[in-house]
Image (cartoon, rainbow, N blue to C red):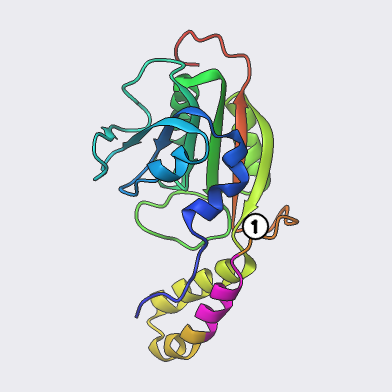
Amino acid sequence: MKSPVVFQSLEDELKPTLKYLRGRVLNAGCGSRDITDFLGKNGAESVEHCDLKSDIPDAIIADLTAIPREDNRYDTIVCNAVLEHVQFPNEVMQELRRVLKPDGTLLLCVPFMQPYHPRPDYRRYSREGMLELARLHQFEVVEIFPVHTLAQTITWIWWSHLDEKHKRFQKALLWLPFYLWGSLSQRTDFSLRDQSNSYQMALKKIGSNGNGRH
């Protein structure tokens, strides 16, 4: 049975961060979804994509721990819902920092309250965990935002539980209420601080000297 969980579009997720989008952009961990047009309409002058696998034409096929590009290349890096799936997040953060210009911005989103989802799925970050991740890798937090809603959080976790337990009757009973709740509750509650589905941050480099890896 198809999941009834209804999420905001990626474009809606990114809206709070678009004021930081500019110049040459890297979509790090892009998968096969090409959002070049959307980024171009919101400040990007050019867009490159990078992932281990991608159907996007001319995407950089590489591990995010070793991006085959020079230091200080990008004005903006978008890394959305990626770090939970990588084996070595600290190495990825170091590499993103390396290829980001000294005055550039990293737009980073990682889940907090989500069920296990497509393999591999290694970790979650609370708000404090996100702030600590930024500090450890010498980024200044410009802003941090909650992402998604209570409906999306509860329906996804509950549905995943029913799915794993093979509760077919309960799934049939709850499909429509879950779908309607999610469909009618798609606007992020920006008053949330500690109980959000996910968090996204706008980050600036601290103490960058442009001399390779840090």
Query: How packed is label 1: few (under 14 Cα within 10 Å), some, or many (20 or more)?
Result: many
* Residue at 65% across, 52% down: 146
Residue farthest along the right direction in this orientation: 191
Q: Is residue 3 above or below residue 211?
A: below
Residue 53 image-quadrant placement: top left
Residue 71 image-quadrant placement: top left
User: Does residue 181 show up magenta in the picture?
Assistant: yes
Amino acid carrying label 1: it is Ser
Left of 197 or right of it: where is 170?
A: left
* Residue at 63% across, 63% down: 187
Mark 1 highlights which residue?
196
* Residue at 45% across, 72% down: 160
Residue 129 image-quadrant placement: top right
Tell me residue 167's x, y (percent).
41, 85
* Residue at 28% across, 39% down: 52
Foreground of the two, 24 or 174: 24
- Label count reads 1
What segment is highlighted magenta in the picture? Answer: 177-186
The quarter of the rendered structure image containing the N terminus is bottom left
User: Does residue 42 show up magenta in the picture?
Assistant: no
Q: Is residue 165 above or below residue 107?
A: below
Tell me residue 12's x, y (percent).
54, 54
Tell me residue 88's x, y (percent).
42, 35
Secondary-structure class at tag 1: loop
Q: Is residue 54 above or below residue 205?
A: below
Question: Secondary structure of the magenta portion, mostly?
Answer: helix
Tell me residue 42's x, y (percent).
52, 40
Foreground of the two, 43 or 88: 43
Q: Is residue 78 above or below residue 169?
A: above
